[in-house]
Amino acid sequence: MKKFLDEISDIMAEAFEACGYETKYAKVTVSNRPDLCEYQCNGAMAAAKAYKKAPIMIAKEVVEKLQEHPAFGIIEAVNPGFINITLSEKFVAAYVDGMYQDADMGYEKAVNPKTIVIDYGGANVAKPLHIGHLRSAIIGESIKRIAKYAGHHVIGDVHLGDWGLQMGLIIEELRDRKPELPYFDESFEGEYPKEAPFTISELEQIYPAASARSKEEPEFMERAHQATLKLQSGDKACRAIWNHIMNVSKTDLKKNYDNLNVSFDLWKGESDAQEFIPDMVQDMIDKGFAHESQGAMVVDVAEETDSKEIPPCIIRKSDGAALYATSDLATMIQRERDFAPERYIYMTDKRQEMHFTQVFRAAKKTGIVKPETELTFLGFGTMNGKDGKPFKTRAGGVMRLEQLVEDINEAVYNRMMENRSMTEEEAREIVKVIGLAALKYGDLSNQASKDYIFDIDRFTSFEGNTGPYILYTIVRIKSILSKYAEQGGDVLAASEIKSPVNLSEKNLMMVLAKYNDVMEQAYAEIAPHKICQYIYELSDAFNSFYHETKILSEENADVKKGFIAVLVLTKRVLEQCIDLLGFEAPERM
């Protein structure tokens, strides 16, 4: 379906053209004076200069052409040349009924779908997920869902940090703790054990201990460097330990990501790109893209139009080691081979913007990706506490993600128990659903690049611009539909949306009519917060309609069926939107 505003603008364009004016002046916008009208067109003001006429004269000519048009209830020219529009109830209802009859509620999918790789998650193996991993995971998941809903072929990759000094540190710490293991016996010739010699809990203790030792003991640090080198050179024992680390870590990471309703199509890591690095670096040298600078190999990526200094992209250190940029470029080579994407989207902390500027330019300059390939970096802001500083535990440490989820769930549970109407067991299950909505909506309702205050009390409120409020609205609609069925009504028999009977129903319909436009914006701008803004507006519009209308006690059966159809569409739109945000609604609250 054509977007609602486009429908109105097209009608306006026909009138401008019929009056001899260019259609570019016919753009219609939502009114900035809702007390006066619903929509407005200010094109006569701009056209006045081009046609050397008073704007009010142009506006009156256009309005005269549209006085009898069925789309408009009221259309008038107002000094000095504005066109104020109030839509007719039938026009609004007809558009919304078109949404009701359509499986995608009027949303038009991409005509030419793209293959898109979204790089998000970015956890390091052998370490627990903490709140620093939250935003990448839930924003990335939402963007993946939005792009898929738009009709594109989307591949989400967790891109694990699994190939560096941390591995050498773990191997050597394990050697000192369990020297009897066969991995440390140079004369061992059999098959290494299939079971890991540590649990995830032990692994999460080993790495911090090893990291602390490396700062105090130069000899231990050197051993870790040598173990890392052996691992990367294919040493059988080191690779066996590394496989154990990967298997134990991935199992735990998947559990934690599942709890966030976050999933990945690929569980690739930095290690997967290593095989491409030697040939890539040599190719860059052979083709003259890379040159030596202070012993390192670099690719110059500065451009004449730069307003600030963009340092060269280092692809090999003076000691021969690879860097994050090297790994990211090699990963692109792998992705080009496997998927040939038309677009890449990277989700990380916004402080990595310079890194991705260098990597993207190097990828384009060296031909790793095509000139027309879209490379998008979406850097997110910091999640802060009420003091405005990065969110910490009460003890001042970095909070584990599991703990954050538990705290949110407990806050939701306490609110629910204030007005208890269900068993504790049922409440605990529902709390998981509401808690996830509170957490995700609290984050996603902010523009991704902005810092925001993480306020558990506000996020778990059942009132205001929160996840629980959105869910409560959906549950309220479900309850009304259920009671309608109990009264003998057939929800499926509500076959069409009829003209609104009051202003609150018309307002609800006009918010519903924005759906197509909002979905298009959310994808085009990579902006989940646009969906949050929309469903808050829609929930408010529905609740106003609910409080001002006797839905189930309406005596006219046809009018009641019209109400039910509007409720069904509102529920469908809200449920689709929260699915794109990565959470769902319970049956009751």
Image: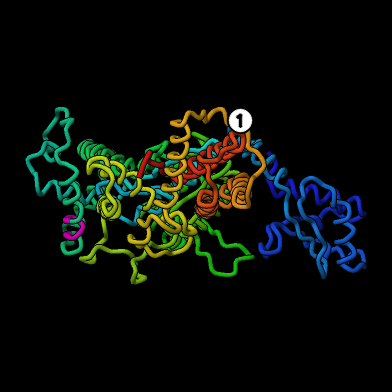
432 on left or right of 156:
left
**Residue 79, quarter of the rendered image:** bottom right
Name the residue nearer the viewer: 478 or 586. Answer: 478
- In the image, farthest residue toward the left: 180
Please, is residue 390 above or below residue 250 in the view? Answer: below
Where is mark 1, residue-wise?
495
83 on left or right of 194:
right
Amino acid residing under circle 1: Ser
Q: Residue at x 33, y 61 (%)?
A: 457
Q: Residue at x 74, y 46 (%)?
A: 7
Q: Position of residue 298 (x, y in %)?
A: 48, 57
Q: Quadrant of the C terminus?
A: top left
Tell me, yes or no, whether the highlighted magenta stretch contains residue 14.
no
Residues drawn in magenta: 209-213
Q: Position of residue 396 (x, y in %)?
A: 23, 66
Q: Position of residue 503 (x, y in %)?
A: 63, 52
Q: Position of residue 122 (x, y in %)?
A: 37, 49
Name the residue nearer the viewer: 306 or 90. Answer: 90
Disc 1 secondary structure class: loop
Would you say residue 494 is visible in this rendering? yes
Structural crowding at the residue carrying mark 1, measured as other residues with C-alpha within 10 Å and reported as few (<14), some (14–19) or many (≥20): some
